[in-house]
Structure formats: C-alpha cells, structure tokens
Amino acid sequence: MNEAKKKKKLDSSIGVPNDDSISALAAFSMYLITGLFLGVGFWVARNKFSVDLVSDPPLTLFLLWSIEFPVVVIIFSLLRNAPEKCSCFRAIGRSILGLISGAFLNALGAISLGAPIGMQYLLRTVHWSFLMSVFTFVPATAVFGASWTDWHRVFASMKPSGNVEYMIFIPAYGAIIGGWFGAWPMPLDWERPWQEWPICVCYGAIGGYIVGQIVSLCAMFFLRKDEHLKVA
Amino acid sequence: MVTYPKRNNKLIPLAFLLIHSVAILIFTRGFLLTRTELPFHSTCSDVSLSPCLSPNPPIHHSNSNQNQPKCWTKPVVDRVVIIVLDALRIDFLAPSAFFPEAKPWMDKLTVLQNLAFGNESSAKIFKAFADPPTTSLQRLKGLTTGGLPTFVDVGNSFGAPAIVEDNFINQLVLNGKRLVMMGDDTWTQLFPNQFQKSYPFPSFNVKDLDTVDNGCIEHLFPTLYKDDWDVLIAHFLGVDHAGHIFGVDSMPMINKLEQYNTVLERVVDILESQAGPGGVHENTMLIVMGDHGQTLNGDHGGGTAEEVETTMFAMSTMKHTPSVPPEFDTSSCKQDPEGKQICISSIEQLDFAATLSALLGISFPFGSIGHVNPELYALGSSSLNLDNTKQPAVKEWLKSYVNVLCVNAWQVKRYIDVYSNSSVVGFSSDDMSRISNLYSAAEHHWSNSVKHILMYNDGNEDSTNTSALKAQIAAYLKFFSSVAELARSKWTEFNLSLMITGFGILVISLILQSLAIVHGDNKPYAVSSGLSTGAAFTLFIVLIRACSFLSNSYILEEGKVANFLLATTGLIKLRYSVMRKTMRKEAFVFLAMVSVLRVSIDIGLTKQAATSQFMSSSPTWMLGLAPDHPALTYAIEIAPILSVAALICVLYVAIARTHSEGIWKYVTVGSMLSYFLIALLWASESKIFGFDGLLQVIGGRNIIPQTVYVIGLVQLFLLASAHMFCSGKDKNWGSRTVALVSACSSPVILLSGKQGSMLALAYLLAGYCIMRLEGVERRTKSDGQNKFSKLDSVCVVQWSLLSVCMFFASGHWCAFDGLRYGAAFVGFDEFVLIRQAILLTIETFGFSIILSVFGLPLLIPSHGEKRHQLFQMYMLYGVISATTVTATILCVTIHRRHLMVWGLFAPKFVFDVVGLILTDVLICLASAFYL
C-alpha cells in the first residue's frame, strides 16, 4: 500500500534536480559498499566473536551498526549539501547527533508498536534502534544537517530532487516498512529462536533496506531516462 | 444531504441487527453443541420400576457378597484398582504386531502384554475409543458420567468445574464404597468431596514430567496393601507431559514407559501375592487405561484417529474367566512373531461407567448412555461360576449378562425420555420414536420369553434357551448402538451445512452493509484521491486484522495485534500531519496514548498467561520495580482519583463550551456528581486518605455504587424522554453525545475498578486526537478550516481499533476465565442472575462497545447537521465489527477439529458474537437517538 503510494508520488514529482553530483552507477557502487560492510558486520560477528543474531542479539546488533555507521557516514558526508560551507568533520559530527536522536525516535516508534519494554530487552532495543537509525536518520543528517525544509520535503512530502535524495529516503522507508512486516511472525507459536524481539524485525529491516536500495536505483535509472527523453 | 429520507436511516441498522442475529443463530446451531445437564440421580430402589429381575431373590449363591446390600445388579468384583495413564496411545500397549511398522516406543509395557497373552489368563487388552473433545477434563467427565460432554454443558455449575451430573464416583459414594485417589488434581476439582483419601498433585506444569508420577508411586504401593478402600484411582501424567514437550518419538517418552512398566510389574506382583482366598485382593480387578490418545507431536483435543484411540488393560485376580460367545466377541487377532495367536478386543469409553457400575453392583449413573461391555464384564464375572457348577460357565454368564443388559437398557431409555422432555433442545420426534420401537421390541421379547427362562431355570432345552438369550442380548445391543449413534450425532458432530449457511448469510450482510455506506454517496467529489487512499488503507487494515484470526497465535495476542495496527495508523497520521504541518502535537499525543494502552495490554496478557493453557507467561513489562514499593502503592492509590478529577474537569469544560442549554446540560452535571461519588468511594476504600470512617457514616459500601447506578438510570430516562418530547428543537448532537456518553461512562468506570478512570482518560485523549486528526491527509494548511463533509474511514477504523484495544487494556481477554466476576457484585451482595449478568456485561463490553458506539458522533468535529455522514460512520463501524466476526466464524469453521477449538476458538467465537449483537443493538439505539 505504502509502496504504491510512494510510486504514485514519485511519478507525480519528477523533480527539478538542483545537484547531480552522483550518477546511478556511482550510487550503485556505494550501495555495494554499504552492503559489503553489512556483510562484513555479519562476518565479524560470526567468525571473530562467534555470535549471531539468534545467539546474542545485542552484541551482533552492536557490531552491525558500529561497522555500518562509519561507512554510511563517510559515503553520505561526501554527498553533503553545500560542501563549500560545511566541512566534512562537521558533517560527521552532526551525523553522530543524528544517530542518537534517530535511535531515540526509532525506539519510541517501536515501543508504541508493541516492542517489549522489560529490562532484559532494553539492550536489544537500544542496539536495534541504533541500527535502524543508521539506515534511516544518519544518511539524512549527514546530507541535510538540520535543514528542516529539506527534511520535510524529502521525508514528509516525498518530493525528492536529485539522486542523492532518492538514495536517502527510499532505503530509509524500505527499512521501516521491512521492519514493520518483519514483526508479523513474532506472535506465531512456531517456537523458533528467531521469533524473539528484535531478530526477525532486524532481518525485515535489512531486507527492506536492500529492496529500498534496488527501488531507488530503478527510480534513478528510469526517472532519469524519462527526464533525458523529455529534455531531448 | 437534507433530502435524505430520515425514516430509512433508523430502519437500516435494525435490518442488519436482524440479519446478523439470524446468521449467528443458524451458525451456532451447527457449531456450539449443547447438552443439558440433568440434576437427577439414580438410586438403588429405582430398579423396581424396571421390568428386569431384581438381583436378590432368584439367584442363589453362597458368596461372601451376600451380607452386603444388593443394588441394581449382583456385584461380581469386590475391589477395583484404576490406573489412568494420561494420553496412552493404543500403540504404547498393544503389541507391535498390530501395527504396520514397529516403532521405538512400542512394546515397552511388556508386563501387561505378557499377562494378556499368557496361557489361561484372566486379562485382556482393549482398544478403547474416546469421544472428542479429547482433553483430560472432558474425558474424565465422560468416563465417569457415561455421557458425551460437549463444549456447553448447560448446568448449574457455570464457572466451577465440579461435576453436578450423576456419575460413577458419586454412585460409589452413595453405595458406601470407599474411594482413594492419587495423582492428577483434576480429579479433586471434578469431585471435591467424594474421595475418602486423596493425594492430588498439580497438573498444570507441563514441563514437569515427574512430580505427579513420583507422588503417585509413593502412595500407590502402601495403599495397595491396605483394606480400607474399595476403589483406588491413580492418575499418572508423565506420558502426556512428555508428549507435549518432547513428542512421542523421544527418549523421555521411552524412559517414562519403561518406568511405568516397572511400576505396573510391582502392582501386579502385589495384587497376585494377595489374591489367594481370604487375601485383600481375592476378587480385585485391575484396570490400566488411557483417558485419550495423542498425536506424534503430543497434541490432543481433536477427533483424529490418533487422538481418540486409546487403550485399556483389564485383569481380574480370579483366574477362571468365562469365555464370551463368539457373537459378542469384538477381538481382532494377529500372529505374533513366534506364531502365537494374540487378540485385542475393543471397547468404547462411553461404556466404561456402565460396565464398572455393573461389575461393582451399584446403580448406573443417571445420564449414562453406554452399555455394559460383554468382554470386560466377562473378565470380572469369574465369581459367578464358583457357586454354580451344574451349568456350563457360558450359560451362567449369559443369564447374568442378559439381566444386567435389561437393567442397563431400562436406565438408558429412562434417561433419553427424561432428557428429551426436560431439555431445551431435545431429540427430534423421529429419532425418539425409532428408539422407542427398538426398546419396546426388545422389552417385549424379554417379558414374553427370556424372563421365564431366567426365573424358572430348569436346565432343559439348553440350545433354545441359549439362542433366546443371545437374541435378547442382540436386541439390546442394537438399541444401545442406535442410542449412542443418536447421541453422538447430537452432541459431538458439527452440522457443517448449518455452519456454512450462517457464514454465507453473514458474508451477504457484509456486502449489503458496504453498499449501504456507498449508497447516497453519489456526489461527484466523493471519489477524490484522498478518499480512495483512505478507503484502501482502511480496507488493508481491516483485512489484516480479519486474516489474523485465522491463526491461533494471533488470537491469543489479539490485543497486541490491534495495538500494532492502531499504532500503524497513528504513525501514518503522524506522517500526514507533519506533511501538512498541522496537528503534530495531537499525533504525538495519540501515539503516546497508544503506548500507554500497550503497557496496559501487556499487563492483561500476563494475567491471561497465568491461567491459559496455551500461553507461556513472559513478564516483559516488568520494570525492575518491586511491586510493593511504597512509591508505587502510593501512586496506585492516588492516580485513579486524580484521573477522576481530570474527567470532572473535562466535563465541566465541555458544558462551559457548548452554548445549548436545557436538559443535556443537567444530565452532564449528573455525571459529574457520579464521578465525584466514585472518587469518594475509592478514597474511602484506600488507607492513605484517612476517609476510612466515611463508609460507616453513610452506611455500608454498597450505598455509593447503588447511587451511581440510580443516577445513570435517571440520566438515561431523562435523555430518552427529552429525545421523545423535544425532538426537532435541538439539532446539535455534540452536547447530546456528551450527555449520553457521560451518563453511560460513570457505571462503566465504577465497575472497571480503579484502572477504569485512568483508562477512560486515555480513551478520551486518544479519541480527542482521532477527532482532531480526522481528515488530516486531505487537509492542506490553507484550508485548515475547511471541513469536509465526506466520510473519513480511517478515523472510524482508528476508533474501532481503539475500542478493541480498550477491551484488552481493561484486563479482559476472550475466555470465560477472563470475565471479572467480581465486578458483578459492585454495589450488591446477593446474587440475582439477571441483575448480575447485566452488570457483568456492562463491565466486559463497557469501554469496548457501549462507550465507543455511543461516542462515535464525537469524531465529527464540526457543528451543524450532517446526518448522512453520521449514518455512514455508524454503518462503517458496523461493517468493521461484522468483518472481524465473519473472520472469526470462518476460522472456527476451518479449525473445528483443531486442538484448541474448545479452549481458544470457541470462547473467542462466543465473545465476538455477543459483541456483534450488542454492537448492532447499540447502533440501532444510537441511530434512533442521534439521527
């Protein structure tokens, strides 16, 4: 449903690109890097610490987000708005702030949707929300900073302009929607260890994130092409 | 919209109420099998009414039984040891030769097999058929009453599990037999006073394989040596629990079976050592039986072959057992690996109570519809041929058996007659006349020929006498089998065509109701993009919720599912409100209220898990604060009263804001008074305010609640009369709604207890936010004041989900132990069925249905007359409720043979159906009041 809504919005808003700092190919390679480091996170967790999401969710989640975070920050800091005014270090600094505040908002959202609130789940929830924040808030803070108009335009109104903004908001929405669907198997009585909070939500979010990346690539590719045709 | 006919609007909800009632009635006839429990008991003297021979005069014997008083039949065994092994599959006991493939769990109870197939044995293995529902409680009830327990056994034991119907255990006590019980504590729940000695052990912890069994073993062996009992019942639970946790094919299961083998070996040793003449077990019968089977996963409850096929082993310590004539022999034989012929017989669990009663010579339970099983009876009748050596054992046994069957048939016929006369839904007259014909034919044969044979047994004409006896037995067995068949079709088989008809009518009503919403909405702007997105989203949410009922897990956690969906709608609204840059505060407050409700739902779930057999309790909501922390207790005392104060303020503001005067205002003031009284009551009940003496001053704690009820009734009366006499003057339903909702809310809050006021506050806040957020996705900043007259389906869905959440947040769940019976006695001490039932209904559905249906008009923010929109909203609300009920009905139809059908789906069905009817009735009332 949301997907459909988004598509419709995308169709209606073939935006007016203000900066074309990145091509679809470059975006693809960046996605590859983020995906690679997500894989590295899992690899480190499995081979260096010999844990996985099922056996030790907090530690694995911590490894995942702490490995993914620098990569995402560096990639999106390179793409930041107005690079001449804002140094790269400043972008990194504000993305750390974004990480924390994003984690807070994600945790609140998860709790209102029914995430467990007991003490034994606290650490898991914290690390899960950090990972979600890396997927959702960190890229946007790195690029936009505290510019409310940009945030509002991209996330609320869904009127992105340019490839960078596609890269920010489609995977972010993908992660959230994926996590939402990922919560569905949790109440079932299959008694599988991965039904514990937040393991399947995590898988859902990662899956949604990757689908979002693919969708955003498609959007860049096809919408761009449309535009070129139109211009021609 | 002014031209919309007014009369129509009031009749349409009534029409849907009727359609829904008819559909549900038809479905319930097919699904909820009911049986009326009769309060009658059999007594020894009854037998003189029967055409049969009374056991005393004609049969001459010189047995030790003679000094005991005789009852319906001549007792043939003195003592019975019943060992129940819970969930004993047939292949645990029967030799593996009877099954296509030998499995690791077979042939473990070798001691019983050797006894049954040994030479000149007086032991037998039976294949026993249980009747669904195959849960322990229902099975024990069935075994002891000799009937077929259904989901709704209408009787006067509602709530308490103790059996009030006449039963085998009760008859034993009446006949002066002494009972000892050990093991599963379900027995002591069912029979609280009947056991002379009992050693119950808790049965609910499925993970504990040994406590019950070890306790049983500890008491079993010493008791067997004593002579201060007549019937011993030992109920072992290990196999059932091992099956639930590990499954049948597992080491713990095999260990359990091997343990039982050693236990049984010792039991048999003790019995045989005492079996000599004069020993305590001279004439004892040992019965080892399962109450039901289990699947390979350890599940039971349904009606599959694995679950209903269990087994029974019976052995008499007297050796010379008469053989049963081949006409009545049910055994099936196989060759064992050594080429020996081994046979197992079969028996229905239905017949257990009658057979045991006949063996012990007590009167049969009044409601038993089973018959005395020939083979089991033969096992016990070895005492018969001790005293009479003139005649062959078979003939002596036939004579005794035919008389027992005569008494048995008379008793069953008496029950069937009394049942169909006194029950609400009896048997059809065709069935009754068929059964009566069979019985009178058998009885005719009895009085004309067989009776004479028995009375004047001269030993002549052996062959004709024997064939006459056999014909008599066959006639009786035919009667019994047709009674059992009729009873099964009545009490254990669903009527699928009725169920499907009911479901179909409900689906049609859904379509009609949806059409009623769309009807009249023919203005061109109605189908704008905003509306269609909202409608699609509504459909999506409602369908997800409906589909969630197809799984038992989602039903168990229904509150969480509803809360999840509600929070999702809240997040979507939040996104729109951020997008439109308006009402952001309300969206956040709404999510905060949803979070509050979810904590409350979690607390409710832990309460549910404590009693539910399907849930494991996981206290996820614990915050690490000790429950008796002083700050916490203080907060618990203070918060409800503060919430009531806040509610009074809200009402005051509501009155002050509205410009209408007249009766509505005074009604609302009455509610404020009620709230104040409630706060006063709670303050005087707690210790920290120092109002303890207040209750004594005003004379008892029932005065305040009764005053609140009276105020509520007066308010409703005033509203109704005002509506009748002043209609047309006041078109503004804002103040009317406030008056009606507040009038209803005070009893609801009072009955809900101290959480009620806090929940009401959360409900109010969340409802206010829904109202403010209504249509936010269509609104732009510029036309924020522009009110659309279209229906916003999302906000109705939110309101409906919110009311579902309120049901669970107020500590209810869809099970009968989820009802808060205590609420029925707020303000009253003595029990009056109708009054207490009304109070219980108000408490159960107060927040979730009564307040939410009456409060629906509050969601329309603007003033002025929008009668058609309100009608649409009510229709939409009705469709949403009906959709969920339809989904529940579909689920119940699909899962009618599911393990949890009686534990989970049927209670859910009952709650949903009652909720739907109540919703429909209230929608009728509300549309009469508002439209």
Image: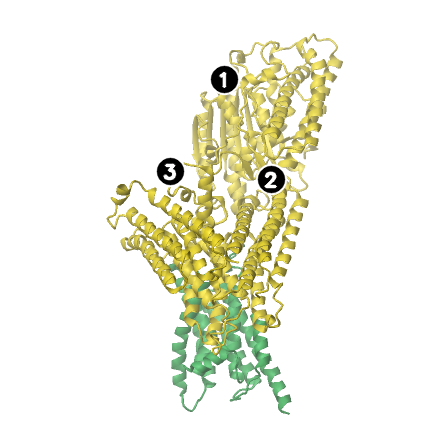
Chain colours: A green, B yellow
Name the amino acid, label 2: Leu
Question: How many residues crowd mark 1 within 10 Å: few (<14), some (14–19), many (20+)?
Answer: some
The answer to whether mark 2 and mark 3 are in CB contact below 8 A is no
Residues at marks 3 and 1, common chain? yes
Picture coordinates of residue B192, whole percent (x, y): 44, 31
Give the foreground label among 2 and 3.
Answer: 3
Please give the label number shown on residue B279. Answer: 1
- SS under mark 1: loop
Letter of the chain that mark 2 sits on in the rendering = B
Q: Earlier in the sequence, mark 3 or mark 1?
A: 1
Please give the label number shown on residue A118. Answer: none
Residues at marks 2 and 3, common chain? yes
Name the amino acid, label 1: Gly
Q: CA distance from mark 2 to mark 1?
A: 48 Å
The answer to whether mark 3 and mark 1 are in CB contact below 8 A is no
Given residues B273 and A213, the one toward you in this image is A213
Given residues B588 and B505, the one toward you in this image is B505
Give the foreground label among 3 and 1.
Answer: 3
Name the amino acid, label 3: Asp
- SS under mark 2: loop
Q: Earlier in the sequence, mark 2 or mark 3?
A: 2
The quarter of the rendered structure image containing the N terminus of chain B is: bottom right
Letter of the chain that mark 1 sits on in the rendering = B
Residue highlighted by disc 3: B829
| Displayed quadrant of residue B382 | top right
Residue B542 in sight from this viewpoint: yes
Residue highlighted by disc 2: B33
